[in-house]
Image (cartoon, grey):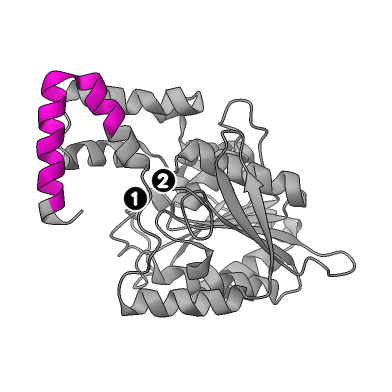
Amino acid sequence: MANFALKVTRLGFSLLQSVSPPLAGNAAFRLFCRTPSKRPKGEKARAAHADGQKALAGTERFDLRLPDGAHAYAYRFNGGAVGMRKRYLMVHGWGSSIDYMAGLVTALAATGAEVIAVDLPGHGRATGRSLHMGQAVNAIRAAEIRFGSFDAVVGHSFGGAASMVGAAGLLPDVPAVLPDRLVLIGSPSEMQWLFKGFGKMIGLGRASQSVLERKVHDVTGRRLEDFDAGKAVGEIRRPVLVVHAEDDKEVSASHARRYAAFGQTVRLHWANGLGHRRIVNAAPVIDTILDFLRESDFEAEAEIIPLPTRRASS
């Protein structure tokens, strides 16, 4: 938030929670789920968005309706291909869209695989201005229902965490979407830090913060602490590639180390110098992902080794 807007927001929540902490906590949750403007900000973002739209031109497009009435939006590459081929799912991060992952998406499609790329509710061409983890997981499940099971799911940031939550079947009444492999790019390993940071930013007191966090259970059926993608990675027993930059200022590199610590099937790749957003379409990262997806299951299992939790070199 801009400084002035943040000051006004903090003042508003200070007044509201002095009257009713439950009202303040509920309002905070609505604000937390509010998705940012879809309009690109800055010259680089506008250029990346325009390039992405060109790359997606001519793809098949699908509206995916979720159980709560929200909508996601899907693109399909190589849907008319004949013969056996892989099927990959792409999921973007918070405040982003598939437009900004076009370099990676088109590289995967160039292998001949059927590639499904999803704009989550409130992002890209999907309708609405709100998103929470339950909706993201339901969007992933809706894609599986519409297109079939996936050989791999590739997620960036929030999309990676949602992919892992979906793979572990952590959402009640939503069947697990468990692919043969997962790729997590700059992804958080749990969500409590984000809620704590948000509450601190807008000046929530303890009572209002508790209401904010309980809302997670109200809308998903699971407690905030249950959405632990780091622990889940050790339970699904699938090869997982974690790509992260130690200079990532939005999602700490400690999350990548946490994935590695919990998962014996995790391969950790440092892409230092690429931050949180440039990492997605960087050529070396794309090559690493393609190599990981080309491996046979036997090769992946043979090469999986426990990784140290200390700082790794790039």
Q: Position of residue 105 (x, y in %)?
A: 60, 69
Q: Could one spot residue 301 in this view of the protein? A: yes
Q: CA distance from mark 1 to mark 2?
A: 6 Å
The residue at the point 56 percent across, 33 percent down is: 68
Instruction: Find residue 55 and name its label.
Output: none
Our reading of the magenta stretch's main secondary structure is: helix
Q: Position of residue 134 (x, y in %)?
A: 51, 36
Count of numbered tags = 2
User: Is residue 178 positioned above or below 311 on the image?
Assistant: above
Which range is magenta?
5-27
Q: Secondary structure at mark 2?
A: helix
In the rendered structure, the answer to whether residue 84 lies left or right of residue 105 reads: right
In the rendered structure, the answer to whether residue 123 lies left or right of residue 213 reads: right
Q: Is residue 19 magenta?
A: yes
- The residue at which mark 2 appears reads as 258
The residue at the point 17 percent across, 31 percent down is: 204
Query: Residue 157, located in which quarter of the rendered image?
Result: bottom left
Q: Amino acid at mark 1?
A: Ser
Q: Is there a contact, CB below 8 Å, between mark 1 and mark 2?
A: yes
- The residue at which mark 1 appears reads as 254
The residue at the point 75 percent across, 56 percent down is: 298
